[in-house]
Structures are given as C-alpha cells and as structure tokens.
Amino acid sequence: MPQNKRLARAVPLLLSWFQENARDMPWRRSPTPYHVWISEIMLQQTRVSAATAYYERFMEALPDVKALAEVPEEELFKLWEGLGYYSRARNLKKAAKELVEHRGGQLPASREELLSLPGIGSYTAGAIASIAFGIPAPAVDGNVLRVVSRILESREDIAKPPVKKQMEALIAGVIPEGRAGDFNQSLMELGALVCVPNGEPKCGLCPLKELCLAHLHGTADQIPVKTRGKARKCEERTVFAVERGGAVLLSKRPDQGLLAGLYEFPNAPGRLSGPESLNYLGIPGEAVLSLEAMPEAKHIFTHVEWRMTGWRILLKETGWEPEAGRFAPLSEAKERYPLPGAFKAYAAVVFGK
C-alpha cells in the first residue's frame, strides 16, 4: 500500500480516537490564536502537567498580545521562572511587539506569515495555523515524527531536516477538510499517550495497530531512527548563597549567552572548598558568622551539564561589600527576581521550600 494511502486510512481512526481520548487542557477549551501560540511555546521542552500551571498564571498576568508586548522583561522572566529555555520568553515578547506595531496586535492567519515571527518555526506555525485558524497546515513535532515513522515503518533518520520536510508533505496531503486542528492534535496526542517516546509503545491501545507496519512486523522498538547529537559537556561549578541581615546576594548574568539577563547566586567554575570560596569572593574570615556546605546538585542544559556544589555564607552586618551584584531582601529576591531552575536546590535552602 502506498504511504499516502496508508496515512489516509489512518485519518478517520485518529479523529475518532482523539474525540474519545483528548486530554482536557485549558488552551484547548479556548483555542484562540494567542492561547495556542503561548501554549505551544511553553510545551516545547516541557511536559503538559508542568506547563499547565504556568500557562494559567501567564494568562492571568498577560491576557493578550498587547500586555505581552508591554511587560517588563524582568516581570516576564519571573512568570517564566522554572520553565527554562528563556530565549523562548524573550522571543515571545519580540514577536508580540512586532504584532502590536505592524499587525494591530493580531497573529496572522497564514502559516508563511507566522513563520516570519521571532521564535516561531515550522511546527509552531503549523500548530497555530491549523488549531486556531483551521488552515490545512502540517504540525510535525517529535511525537508526530515517531508516530508516522512507525506507521510507515520508515527507517529514515528523523534528525535530518529533509526527512522532516518529507513527513510534512505526506501529512499535508491527508489533512481532512475542516478538521486540520483536530487531526494534527490527534497525531500529537497519540504520540504523547500511546506511541510513547520512552519505553515500550502501548500498541494494544492504539487505534492504528492494524495499519501500523512497525507493530505488524514487530519493529516498533527500532523506530524511529535518530542520530545522537554531540556528547554533552560537563562543568563543575561552585555556588555561593551569601546572606546578610535578611538579604541575599544576587548578581545579573550578561545580556548574551547562557541564561542571558537572568539573576543568579554568585558562582565560580570548579569545585571550591569553603576557604577557597571565601578567598574567591574576597570575604575576610572576620566578616563571616557561619560557613555551611549546601547539597550537591546538577542541571542539564542543551549542550552542557552543570555539576554543582554550594556554600551558604552568613555574614556580619559590616566587614565586607561585594564588587558586583547587590543584597536583596529575601522576600524581594524570591518574589521579584527571576532565578533560573539551575539554582533551584540552592533557592530552596535560602528561601525555604
């Protein structure tokens, strides 16, 4: 059976399954262009269960494009705190400003025009176009690539852009009239709930098991084929929670590079002992009330992993002033300043869980 005919036969089965099994998500209850856009950006690299609370808080604070365009970056990052990949939030604001300045604050009802906005790639453009506007555009993410690769028993490398384009073309050819959004979401949902990325796929629950070549031939555990990326680099770092009189020392990261523009606890490359930490910071021993080790922690970025140790340093009221950063009252530091998730373990020590 040709690939396009096999996928075409899957369409009614997917739509029927999705109607019965679609998860209740706040952005699905009101799939406006703005709601779909924000939810899709949040869901990149983030599980649905984790993104839901962030989405609801975000919508309460920034209910429309104009509010997003005008929000101060620091406030935006605080709303995003814990989601990671802060460039996503920065691109949301850039795109919102473009929409307000040039499009009357409205997202365009065109996949091609959506692609011109900062932070919107082919998948997100297809998702917004199909779900919010009903445009028959493919929305191909990792879930969809996996599902379609298994249905067709394709051994093409899904990490290669030409393979993704081939999949997009195949899917575009079978999108049902008037049901583009439901169809795209049905593929995504099947990949999230049944044709899962880690562990054994739940083929017994799949509405496509009689059509899926990987299931019929027992090759689902071998598909999809995806080349491994470069090995992640590991870095040792020492984190300092320096406190004085109910305040904690925070510094701001540079505007470019990893965690750009966010606040952090001061830190240093390498694994420093307590005395080495005081020496690194230039804190004289007579200014210290106590020096305690904090838990070891690690945080994984896209291309680097931080393996951290930490020291909590309580200071006397006088005797040392930092060369960079500022002491912020604990309540202000917790509520106002966006701290990256990399420092979550140390924030819990300083602010309490």
Image (cartoon, rainbow, N blue to C red):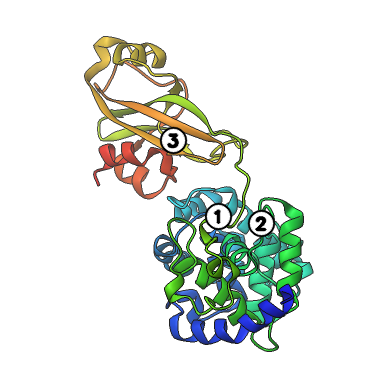
Q: Which mark is residue 79?
A: none
Residue type, mark 3 in image: Glu
Looking at marks 1 and 3 on the same chain, the residue that comes earlier in the sequence is marked by 1
Type of the residue with mark 2: Arg
First-in-chain label (1 vs 2): 2
Element type at marker 1?
helix
- Res 299 quadrant in image: top left
Quick check: 245 above or below 7? above
Where residue 3 sits, quadrant-wise, is: bottom right
Residue 130, percent from left and from top: 66, 77
Q: Secondary structure at mark 2?
A: loop
Label 3 to label 2: alpha-carbon separation = 44 Å
Q: 10 Å neighbourhood of mark 1: few (<14), some, or many (≥20)?
A: few
Residue 103 appearing in the image: no
N-term mark: 3 or 2: 2
120 relative to 260, above or below: below
In percent of the image, x 43 and y 76: which residue is there?
Answer: 205
Q: Are marks 1 and 2 in contact (CB under 8 Å)?
A: yes
Distance from disc 1 to disc 2, alpha carbons, whole Å, reads 9 Å
Residue at image location 29% in from the left, 29% down from the top = 243
- The percent coordinates of residue 320 (x first, y second) are 34, 17
Q: Which residue is mark 2?
A: 155
Foreground residue, 201 or 101? Answer: 201
Q: Check disc 1 and report the residue beneath it.
A: 222
Residue that badge 3 annotates: 264
Mark 2 residue crowding within 10 angstroms, few (<14) / some (14–19) / many (20+): few
Q: Quadrant of the N terminus?
A: bottom right
Q: Residue at x 43, y 60 (%)?
A: 200
Residue 48, position in %: x, y?
44, 64
Q: Residues within 10 Å of mark 3 (few under 14, many from 20)?
A: many
